Image: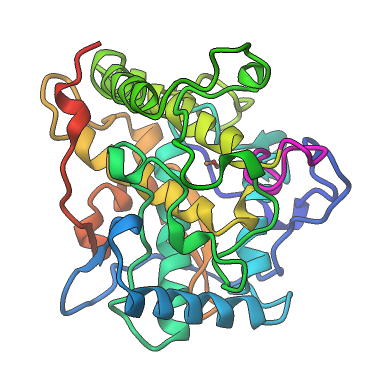
């Protein structure tokens, strides 16, 4: 059977897998409405973060400022948006109808679908706060050379897009290492490689993960995870790398748990998170165009799996994986930019 919604009456405090004792539970409501497709006049186009202009930056800055200013118990507030990740990813939830069984979306075929919905509502809330239904969040285009640094819009300490808990060594112009892991920390005199070499390595990795290692839906999305099963069945190629690596690279190695980006419980606190996931989401859409058996799962247990999110009107909404397979139906698309790794054969 498909993974059911979390049982909000059984939200765990603190979550079993959180390294610090925190409360990640959302405000409670028993009124759950079914998701309906939004109506819109034109698609919201998510721009590459390195390409946006000052007006766009000002708009996002304003929207996030308003989101940060909402009271903590407002489900639209930035602190509640961050807690979504904590609740769904470090053992805050049990599956409805399975009081003993944890609900956790990572390391499984729910990874891409869950995060698509997560950033969808985040974006809708921001748009509604500034009264601009065309507002679209930026994507961190780390798969292309001119996007392989922390995008500069996130690095101004006076803006709402800034987060203090990031690795100081990895500020621009440092090129991201898409294959970074904790062991890369003291890897010897040849690390980091030259910028030029790092870019090459990144493109090779992208090609490998998106094409060579992602020939089927399970290899790409991750292993089946069904109702009543414990989570953590196995990650797909993109989740493992570069996704996990970008998290670890971005978080602050001097914080006890690599906050913010480097730990599930805290990563939603960094606005960079939503840009990372917009690109992961974009890469999912690209993968589906790469041919062969690269198609989404057709298993009903995947299609019918459900999540809960609060929307821009503070309604608690139940969504299904199958309703999120086409971003255009959800009202958004991505700015078209070059995809240089398509031709970077390892
Ligand atoms: Cu839920 Cu980028 O992780």
| Residue 323, x across and y down, in percent | 31, 53
Is residue 255 located in the magenta-colored stretch of the structure?
Answer: yes
- Of residues 291 and 249, which is closer to you in this image? 249
Answer yes or no: is residue 72 visible.
Answer: yes
Q: Tell me where residue 199 sits by quadrant.
A: top left
| Residue 21, x across and y down, in percent | 88, 47
User: Residue visible at 40% across and 73% down?
Assistant: 57
User: Residue visible at 25% across and 13% down?
Assistant: 212
Q: Is residue 132 left or right of residue 97?
A: left
Q: Main secondary structure of the magenta part?
A: loop
Name above or below for residue 135 compared with residue 200: below
| Residue 96, x across and y down, in percent | 63, 46
Q: Which residues are magenta?
A: 253-266
- Of residues 122 and 46, which is closer to you in this image? 46
Name above or below for residue 148 compared with residue 232: below
Q: Tell me where residue 42 sits by quadrant.
A: bottom left
Q: Is residue 201 left or right of residue 266?
A: left
Q: Tell me where residue 231 sits by quadrant.
A: top right
User: Residue visible at 52% across and 51% down?
Assistant: 273
Which residue appears farthest toward the right when viewing the image?
21
Answer yes or no: is residue 167 visible.
Answer: no
User: Residue visible at 48% across and 55% down?
Assistant: 274
| Residue 131, x across and y down, in percent | 39, 89
Q: Quadrant of the C terminus?
A: top left
Name above or below for residue 220 compared with residue 172: above
């Amino acid at each position: 059977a498909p993974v059911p919604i979390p049982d909000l009456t059984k939200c765990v405090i603190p979550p079993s897998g959180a390294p610090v004792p925190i409360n990640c539970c959302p405000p409670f409501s028993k009124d759950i409405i079914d998701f309906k497709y939004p109506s819109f006049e034109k698609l919201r186009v998510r721009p590459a973060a390195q390409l946006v202009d000052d007006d766009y930056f000002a708009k996002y800055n304003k929207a996030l400022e308003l989101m940060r200013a909402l009271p903590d118990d407002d489900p639209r507030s930035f602190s509640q948006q961050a807690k979504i990740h904590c609740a769904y990813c470090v053992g805050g939830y049990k599956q409805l109808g399975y009081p003993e069984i944890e609900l956790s979306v990572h390391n499984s075929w729910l990874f891409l679908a869950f995060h698509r919905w997560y950033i969808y509502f985040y974006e809708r809330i921001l748009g509604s706060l500034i009264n601009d239904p065309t507002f679209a969040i930026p994507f961190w285009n780390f798969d292309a050379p001119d996007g392989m640094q922390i995008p500069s819009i996130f690095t101004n300490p006076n803006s709402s897009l800034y987060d203090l808990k990031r690795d100081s060594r990895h500020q621009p112009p440092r090129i991201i290492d898409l294959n970074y892991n904790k062991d890369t920390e003291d890897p010897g005199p040849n690390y980091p490689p030259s910028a030029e070499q790092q870019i090459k390595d990144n493109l090779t990795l992208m090609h490998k993960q998106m094409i060579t290692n992602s020939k089927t839906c399970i290899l790409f999305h991750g292993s089946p995870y069904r109702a009543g099963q414990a989570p953590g069945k196995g990650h797909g190629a993109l989740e493992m790398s570069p996704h996990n690596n970008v998290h670890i690279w971005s978080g602050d190695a001097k914080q006890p748990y690599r906050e913010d980006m480097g730990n599930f419980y805290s990563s939603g606190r960094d606005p960079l998170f939503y840009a990372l996931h917009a690109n992961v989401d974009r890469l999912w859409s690209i993968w589906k165009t790469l041919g062969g058996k690269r198609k989404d799962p057709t298993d009903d247990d995947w299609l019918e799996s459900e999540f809960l999110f609060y929307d821009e009107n503070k309604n608690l909404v139940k969504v299904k994986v199958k309703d999120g397979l086409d971003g255009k139906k959800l009202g958004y698309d991505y700015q078209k930019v070059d995809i240089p790794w398509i031709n970077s054969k390892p």
